[in-house]
Image: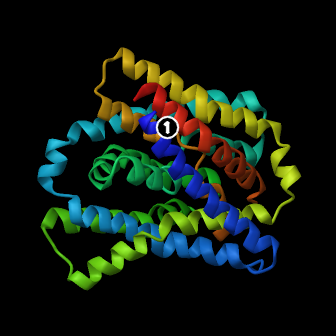
C-alpha cells in the first residue's frame, strides 16, 4: 500500500485546491474574469518557469546521451496514444469542435498540472527530470497537434500553427535545453525566482480549474454521460492495457512508472486553461476536467498499486 497512501494524499491535496477555486468563484470572491487572468498567469508565467527551471538545472548533453532510450520510449507511447484517440473518439459520436476536444482528452493526459504534483510528491525531483525527457515528444505533440485540436485557426490563418507552437511553454523548453546543454548558469536570485514561481504552478492550475467549473451548472457538468465513458477509457482501460503490456514486456519498474505517469493521469486541462484564454467554449472541457480529476483521486493510487 506504499504507493496508494502517498498518491492518494497528493491527489487529495490537488482536489482541495480545485475545491478552493470553486468556492471562491461561487461565493463571488473571484469575479467572472478571474479565470482568464489565472489562465494567462499559468500559460505565460508559471508553466514556463517550471519547464525552464527543470531543464536549465538538469539538462546536459551527457544526460540526453545516457537517457536517449527514454526519449525513444516516450515517442513510441505518444504515437500509440494518439492512434488510440483516433480509434476511440468515433465511438462517442461527437461532432465538430467537441470531437476535437474529445480526441485531445483521450490522447493528452494532465501530466503538466496534476501529473507534476503527483510525480514530484511520489517519486521526487530527479525522477521528474527523467520523466520530462521521457515525455519530450508528448510535450512537443501537445503544443503542435494538440493545440490544433483545441484552438482552431480562425479565417484560414496559415500562420496559426507557428503561433500555437511557439508559445511561452515551448519557448521556455527550448531556452532550458539550450541553457542546460551550454552549461549556462543563472545568478542565485534568478534560480530562486524560478523555483518559487514554479512551485505556484500546480496549486494555481487546480484553483483555476475550480473557478472555471464554478461558471457552469454543476448538475449539467456531471450529467454528461459521454464524459464518463471517456474517463473510464482514460483512467482505467488505457493504463491497464499498457500496464499489462509493460509487465509482459518485462520493463523495469522505473520505466513502467513513467508509462503510468502518462497513462493514469486524468484528461488534460488545456481545453480549459488554454482554450479559455483564446475565447473558446470550455463547457465540455470543464466537464472532462471535473469528472476525470475527481475520479483520478481514487484511480491513480489504484493503478500505481496494481503495477508498481
308 up-or-down from 5: above or below: above
139 up-or-down from 227: above or below: below
Rendered location of residue 88, percent (x, y): 65, 28
Task: Judge by depth and name the residue closer to the eye, 10 or 34.
Answer: 10
According to the image, what is the colour scheme of the structure?
rainbow
Task: Judge by depth and name the residue closer to the eye, 155 or 287.
Answer: 287
Identify the residue at horizontal 21%, vertical 69% (top origin).
Answer: 179
Which residue position holds label 1? 4
Q: Which quarter of the picture shows residue 204?
A: bottom right
Q: Is residue 274 visible?
A: no
Task: Judge by depth and name the residue closer to the eye, 271 or 163.
Answer: 271
Identify the residue at horizontal 56%, vertical 57% (top origin).
Answer: 13
Rendered location of residue 58, percent (x, y): 22, 60
In the rendered image, the residue lying farthest to the top is: 248
Identify the residue at horizontal 14%, vertical 67% (top origin).
Answer: 182
Is residue 89 left or right of 41 when viewed as pictured? right
Is residue 223 left or right of 249 when viewed as pictured? right
User: Total label count?
Assistant: 1
Q: Which quarter of the picture shows residue 269?
A: bottom right
SS label for mark 1: helix
Q: Is residue 41 visible?
A: yes
Is residue 85 left or right of 25 when viewed as pictured? left
Rendered location of residue 158, percent (x, y): 55, 61
Identify the residue at horizontal 30%, vertical 24% (top origin).
Answer: 251
For the C terminus, the quadrant is: top left
Classify mark 1: residues with Cα within 10 Å, few (<14), some (14-19) or many (20+).
some
273 up-or-down from 140: above or below: below
Amino acid at each position: 500500500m506504499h504507493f496508494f497512501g502517498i498518491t492518494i494524499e497528493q491527489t487529495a491535496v490537488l482536489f482541495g485546491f480545485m475545491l478552493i477555486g470553486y468556492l471562491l468563484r461561487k461565493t463571488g470572491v473571484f469575479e467572472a474574469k478571474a479565470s482568464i487572468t489565472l489562465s494567462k498567469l499559468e500559460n505565460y508565467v508559471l508553466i514556463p518557469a517550471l519547464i525552464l527551471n527543470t531543464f536549465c538545472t538538469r539538462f546536459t548533453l551527457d544526460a540526453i546521451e545516457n537517457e536517449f532510450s527514454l526519449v525513444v520510449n516516450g515517442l513510441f507511447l505518444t504515437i500509440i496514444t494518439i492512434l488510440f484517440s483516433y480509434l476511440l473518439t468515433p465511438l462517442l459520436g461527437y461532432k465538430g469542435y467537441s470531437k476535437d476536444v474529445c480526441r485531445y482528452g483521450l490522447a493528452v493526459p494532465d501530466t503538466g498540472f496534476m501529473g507534476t504534483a503527483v510525480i514530484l510528491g511520489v517519486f521526487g525531483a530527479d525522477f521528474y527530470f527523467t520523466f520530462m525527457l521521457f515525455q519530450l515528444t508528448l510535450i512537443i505533440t501537445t503544443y503542435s497537434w494538440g493545440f490544433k485540436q483545441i484552438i482552431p485557426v480562425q479565417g484560414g490563418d496559415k500562420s496559426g500553427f507557428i503561433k500555437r507552437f511557439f508559445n511561452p511553454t515551448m519557448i521556455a523548453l527550448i531556452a532550458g535545453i539550450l541553457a542546460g546543454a551550454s552549461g549556462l548558469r543563472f545568478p542565485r536570485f534568478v534560480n530562486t525566482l524560478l523555483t518559487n514561481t514554479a512551485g505556484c504552478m500546480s496549486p494555481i492550475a487546480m484553483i483555476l480549474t475550480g473557478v472555471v467549473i464554478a461558471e457552469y451548472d454543476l448538475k449539467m457538468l456531471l450529467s454528461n454521460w459521454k464524459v464518463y465513458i471517456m474517463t473510464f477509457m482514460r483512467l482505467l482501460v488505457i493504463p491497464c492495457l499498457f500496464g499489462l503490456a509493460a509487465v509482459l514486456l518485462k520493463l523495469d519498474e522505473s520505466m513502467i512508472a513513467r508509462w503510468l505517469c502518462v497513462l493514469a493521469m486524468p484528461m488534460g486541462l488545456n481545453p480549459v486553461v488554454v482554450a479559455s484564454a483564446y475565447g473558446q467554449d470550455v463547457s465540455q472541457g470543464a466537464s472532462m476536467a471535473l469528472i476525470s480529476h475527481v475520479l483520478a483521486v481514487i484511480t491513480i493510487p489504484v493503478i500505481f498499486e496494481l503495477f508498481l
